[in-house]
Image (cartoon, rainbow, N blue to C red):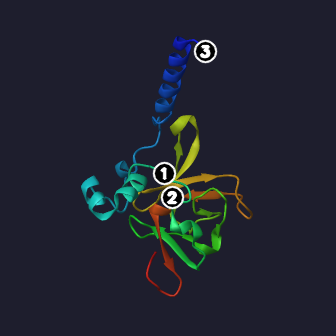
């Protein structure tokens, strides 16, 4: 039989740990604090971006897996920053990683920057737009050839521009 005090202390410990795990202990500067070609106040970003785009691009959030239509995007074209329209990834480097986020094995030249991310008791490499500093996702070393990298991007942080000039997605 379970002792009531043990049960309550266990529930409290689990709740405390779950809440503690949501805290971010980061060495990254917030994307909005860097020096970038495109700089705006938080109020200007909030007027331009949807709340979810702001949460990801400016507050380094993460969208739910499998929630982005860009995850299923198969057309030829370019994936650009939703914050400043900088071309980031070509559809030629996109692949299905099975993670629930749009994944690429390489980026376009001079498109991204990286920083060390120490949130959630992990060390990862954060990827941001080199022009506006917007958080895009993370890069991991478990991708396919030829680079062996997996740029795991938040779809909400990007927009798709199909080849041939159709309307952006």
Residue identifier under label 1: 62
- Label 3 or label 1, whichever lies nearer to me, is 3
Residue 24 shown left or right of residue 10 in the figure: left
The reply to whether discs 2 and 1 touch (Cβ–Cβ < 8 Å) is: yes
At mark 1, the secondary structure is loop
Which of disc 1 and disc 3 is earlier in sequence?
3
Residue count near mark 1 (Cα–Cα under 10 Å), binned few <14, some 14–19, many ≥20? many
Report the residue at 32% width, 59% height from top. Answer: 39
- For this orientation, the residue located farthest to the right is 145
Report the residue at 53% width, 13% height from top. Answer: 4
The reply to whether discs 3 and 2 touch (Cβ–Cβ < 8 Å) is: no
Residue identifier under label 2: 154
The image quarter in which residue 105 lies: bottom right
In this rendering, the answer to whether 148 lies above or below 75 is: above
User: Where's residue 94, x and y in %?
Assistant: 63, 68
Residue 71 shown left or right of residue 128 in the figure: right
């Amino acid at each position: 039989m379970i002792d009531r005090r043990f049960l309550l202390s266990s529930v409290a410990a689990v709740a405390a740990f779950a809440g503690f795990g949501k805290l971010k202990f980061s060495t990254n500067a917030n994307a909005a604090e860097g020096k970038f070609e495109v700089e705006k106040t938080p109020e200007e970003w909030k007027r331009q971006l949807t709340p979810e785009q702001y949460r990801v691009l400016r507050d380094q959030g993460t969208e739910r897996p499998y929630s982005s239509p860009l995850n299923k995007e198969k057309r030829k074209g370019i994936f650009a920053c939703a914050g400043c329209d900088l071309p980031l990834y070509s559809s030629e480097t996109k692949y299905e990683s099975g993670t629930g986020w749009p994944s690429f094995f390489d980026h376009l030249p001079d498109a991204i920057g990286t920083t060390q991310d120490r949130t959630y008791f992990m060390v990862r490499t954060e990827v941001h737009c080199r022009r506006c500093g917007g958080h895009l996702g993370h890069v991991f070393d478990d991708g396919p050839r030829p680079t062996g990298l997996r740029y795991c991007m938040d779809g909400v942080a990007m927009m798709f521009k199909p080849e041939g000039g159709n309307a952006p997605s």
